[in-house]
Amino acid sequence: MNIGLCLSGGGTRGVFHIGVLSALRELKIYPSVVSGTSAGALVGALFCAGVAPTVILEEAKSVKWYHFLGARIPKNGISDLSIIKQLLQKYISKDAFENLNIPLHIAATNMSLGEVTVFNTGPLFQVVMASCAVPFLFEPVIIDQKIYMDGGITMNLPVSPIVPSCDQVIASNLIPIESMAVNKIKGIQQTLTRVLEISINQNTKFQKPLAHKLIETAEICKYKRYDLNNPDALYKLGYKTAMEILG
């Protein structure tokens, strides 16, 4: 049986995916193909390269926000995501999708055309960076003379690209939509965050039914998407949720 694994975007909540990977290993479930967006693209690339979940977790726990600040100031964001490239270079010897142990599909948003592009061949590192490039926070990535940014804008849970090659697909979703009280939506930051969540939910709701198993929990909503202070809690939550749904 060919089992596909889809890992959504969701910022630092991506450590949840690492817990899911540990659960899959314990349950002896071995994906034959993986897809990912943003944080899911990064975790997916390392996993498909053969990096153990425990090692990915230690890397996640070592990251601090100041690591994203380089020698130069990007024009269109706080960071140029060079830290992502350095991490990939550390564990992946050749910058190519074809060099991975497991086939990988990554969603990124083509800002010029206003549509999703799913990459699965050619250079890998720039594609992962493009998929992680959240607007205003990170600088856009140029690939083949086209501007790319966060895949979550157009396909945060890329199940459909791997459905044709799978008997079953397991999807791990980091941004479940939840109702929000009126007094919680106040100020520019909260409003923009809510707008992003609603936008992501609109492109995600068409992907969820395509998955045979959906690993998702409302508990993750208590963790902010750009807070680096809770890796252990997110890892344990991912492991626990996956074991409850798949075990």
Image (tube, helix red, strand yellow):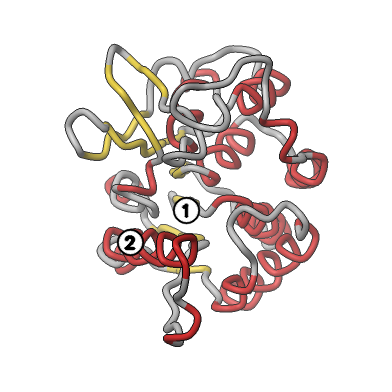
Give the quarter of the image for residue 80.
top right
Q: Say what amino acid the circle numbered 1 marks.
A: Ser
Q: Are marks 2 and 1 in contact (CB under 8 Å)?
A: yes
Q: Which residue is mark 2?
A: 204
Q: State the separation of the CA atoms marked 2 and 1.
A: 9 Å
Give the quarter of the image for residue 145.
top left
How many residues crowd around disc 2 within 10 Å: few (fewer than 14), some, or many (20 or more)?
many
Q: Which residue is mark 1?
A: 8
Under circle 2, the secondary element is helix
Give the quarter of the image for residue 92.
top right
Name which of mark 2 and mark 1 comes first in the sequence. Answer: 1
The location of residue 54, given as percent across then percent down, is 80, 46
Please, is residue 206 above or below residue 35 in the view? below
Q: Residue at x 34, y 46 (%)?
A: 162
The answer to whether 24 appears left or right of 154 in the picture is: right
The answer to whether 149 appears left or right of 189 in the picture is: left
Q: Residue at x 69, y 61 (%)?
A: 23
The location of residue 131, given as percent across then percent down, is 44, 36
Q: Say what amino acid the circle numbered 2 marks.
A: Thr
The location of residue 166, given as percent across then percent down, is 36, 50
Observer-nearest of 4 and 129: 129
